[in-house]
Amino acid sequence: MSSVNNLNGSGAGAVCTRCSPADVEQGRCNATHFVHEKMDDEPVAELEPEIVTPRPPPVDLSHHLSSLARSLRKSNLKGLYKYRSVPGIVNLAGGLPSPNYFPFDSLSASVAPCDRFAESMNSSLLSMLKSSKRCRNITVPKFVSPQGGRSSDVCLASALQYSAVEGLPKLRTFVKEFATKYQHQGKIPYDSPEVIMTCGNTDGLAKALKILGEGARGDKMLVEKYVYGGGPETAAAMGIGIVPVEMDKEGMMADGDGGLQEILESWDTVRDGPRPHLMYTITLGQNPTSSVLGLERRKEIYALCQKYDIIILEDDPYWFLQYGLFPELPDNRTFLARLTPSYITLDTDGRVLRFDTFSKTMAPGCRLGWIIGHPRFTERIARLTDTTTQFPSGAIQALVTKLLVDTWSISGWITWLSLLREKYEQRANLMCAALETSRTVTIIHLKNIRVRDDDGNVIDGPGGKYSLVHKAVKELYEFERPMGGMFIWVRVYFEIHRLFDGTNGQRIMDALFKYLAGPNLRCLVCPGGYFVPLDDGEGDGWKYLRLCFAAVEVEDLKRASENFGRGVKEFFELTEFPPDEDVEADGAGEDAELDVPHFC
């Protein structure tokens, strides 16, 4: 087992890339300088004591499966894959093209050190460029080297070939170890949770809905009142009804008006049809509100899902982006231990399917992620995958495997995630500071008062009148500092705008959107109505705007945030609606991109 020091990046087995041998010998090397070696079996955080007796098996939830899921059969041909690794076997069974005829002889990339961002925590692009000198070149060869190569080594001959739908074995093994021992701290409360690789969370969710949801039987899905549209829209396209649940600053409400308990207890099956048996939720860095659902609230909601037999579809691409936890950069063990845990750590029943992705940790274009959950569900997703997308891109899987398994290791991967969290929190703080400066406006009311004598007559001349000055501070908008994720959810008080008549809130919001994106400000924001599930125009999404602090350069972020505040102030001074015309790039039509920062 590795030492505790080795978990944090120092001690025996770590190789410093920046300090002198003497500094390393004397222990004067900063822990964040290390590119960690592979740790075979040591978890980053303390695990629960090993349970000698088998854990109780989860309950049977197979009644949730759709008719499609029940009809899916295992592929007989794919069952032959296990024989391909038998030494000396000659494969005449599979209809596979010869890897000798693949046009790609190797796949190479220059990759960052896992601690790249430690060097630029308080610095500029120049430091980033300096750190790029420590990049490593990785290469995926066509074939495993006959000299010292192992059959498990990743190569293009296998990565670009037809392969198991669950993912490349070496990558899937890494992901499963990371997810079970490190990300979820060994706390998944049933034996043998399973992992299947996906083409990202959108793909994973669509497949989960197909094996669990069925519009023809009246299935319904619970979602947060404000939520990323991908989940509800995918479900609605399958005929699954959408049931919004009220939210507060923490996220989905367990009780109270419009909360989960009230909805489920008051459900009338005669009037409303079957009670919802699915729940789609983004709990960590919720999109769009950036809230983080605490552990106690999770326990309450999970208990309700047990009582009313609900499957939880937990979509958490921002799980590692939790803010306000660390006054200084934590070591790997502390980083993982302090993060709010997933529903899956409470899942004694096996009713949680959790979706993770490399989109926010590497790049969205990788289209690579994974689902972790009970095998009764992941196995059906694997069968569905075999008839739809099959496996994720072999080239991407090969590169990610080469980076995570052969270059960074689990320890390096956790270091990368921790430093990413730090960088995004800096951006969140920058935007919050800029927004705060323009949040309020002082309104001065002047009123001339005529002075009367004891008989009530107006006094003329000097001293016969004076001005009464009244000052009032009005909030134009408010926001909560994000607890996680990539967004700030801004509540704009359109109701105090002089043009508001009680019915035209959506029109005023549309006018502000165009005013901000116009030629004087060039600040593109996302209307809140986009996050009201299946918005029918009757909701209050028009009161909100979502701002993203993740995508643009820091200099542009500061300027755009300041422009937002200035633009809102200017907009509230308007006495009439601006011309109702679309904002377009100069000389371009509606398909052209705006010449504005990609703000969200």
Image: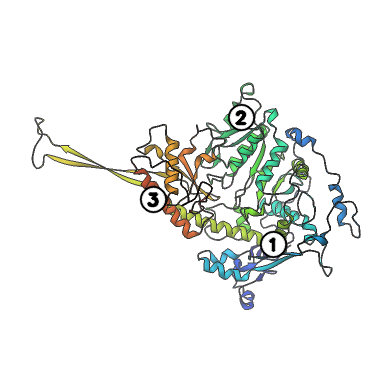
Mark 2 → mark 1, Cα distance in angstroms:
46 Å
Name the image quarter holding residue 241: top right
The residue positioned 66% from the left and 59% from the top of the image is 413
Q: Of residues 5 and 229, which is closer to you in this image? A: 229
Query: Would you call the spot at circle 1 few (<14 residues within 10 Å), some (14-19), or many (20 or more)?
Result: many
Q: Main secondary structure of the magenta part?
A: loop
The kind of residue on which mark 1 rests is Leu
Q: Position of residue 422 (x, y in %)?
A: 55, 58
The residue positioned 83% from the left and 70% from the top of the image is 147
Q: Left of 307 or right of it: where is 255?
A: left
Residue interval drawn in magenta: 280-284
Q: Position of residue 150 (x, y in %)?
A: 82, 64
Instruction: Report the label total.
Output: 3
Query: Would you call the spot at circle 3 few (<14 residues within 10 Å), some (14-19), or many (20 or more)?
Result: some
The residue positioned 11% from the left and 30% from the top of the image is 456
Q: Position of residue 42 (x, y in %)?
A: 71, 59
- Which label lies toward us, 3 or 1? 3
* Rendered view: 205 above or below 143: above
Q: Which residue is mark 3?
A: 566
The kind of residue on which mark 3 rests is Arg
Q: Circle 1 — which element?
A: helix
Q: Of residues 486 and 193, which is closer to you in this image? A: 486
Q: Circle 2 — which element?
A: helix
Q: Which residue is mark 2?
A: 264
